[in-house]
Amino acid sequence: MNNVQFIENNGKREYAILPYALYERLAALVEEATDAQALNDFHLRDDGFRIPDDLLRRELAGESPVKLWREYRGLTIEGLAERAGVAVAEIRQIEKGVLAPEGDLLTRLAKKMGIPEQVLIP
């Protein structure tokens, strides 16, 4: 650390004055360390769940999230109804927006399609 100067207060070093080039190198190292920590924190919190772009666009256009995920998972209305233990008519009403899934039904549908419940809330 060449050309670093110190300012003392009561005999103790309180400030360091350093060449600008050294400051830039140190600032870059701090930024890299901060970015690495942020990436690490992201990976620790990441549950691995991703929403395909096409599904998101279609949901934003007004389609039922239950219908989108059912089709994405390759299920028929009958298949999902059977897996979730509900009537086919109930799934149809949900997909048409006549009925909103909530509570236990929301939990069962999400579980049977392998997705977080929040994804099914329109």
Image: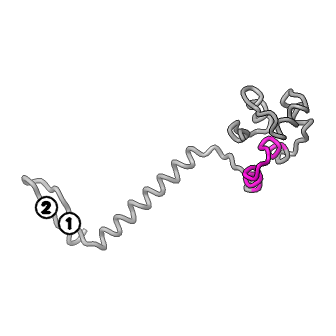
Q: Is residue 47 above or below residue 34?
A: above
Hey, which residue is sitting farthest front in the picture? 98
Q: Secondary structure at mark 2?
A: strand
Q: Position of residue 38 (x, y in %)?
A: 49, 52
Q: Residue at x 77, y 28 (%)?
A: 105
Q: Is residue 92 above or below residue 28?
A: above
Region of the chain picked out in magenta, as a range = 54-70
- Which circle's residue, 1 or 2, is located before the other in the chain? 2
Q: Position of residue 70 (x, y in %)?
A: 83, 42
Q: Quadrant of residue 98?
A: top right
Q: Residue at x 23, y 68 (%)?
A: 18
Q: Are marks 1 and 2 in contact (CB under 8 Å)?
A: yes
Q: Would you say the magenta stretch is mainly helix, strand or loop?
A: helix
Q: Quadrant of residue 77?
A: top right
Q: Badge 1, how many Cα within 10 Å: few under 14, some, many 20+?
A: few
In this view of the protein, which residue sits in the foreground, 78 or 92? 92
Q: Amino acid at mark 2?
A: Ile
Q: Amino acid at mark 1?
A: Ile
Q: Is residue 101 magenta?
A: no
Q: Is residue 66 above or below residue 11?
A: above
Q: Which residue is mark 1?
A: 17
Q: Badge 2, how many Cα within 10 Å: few under 14, some, many 20+?
A: few
Q: Which residue is mark 2?
A: 7
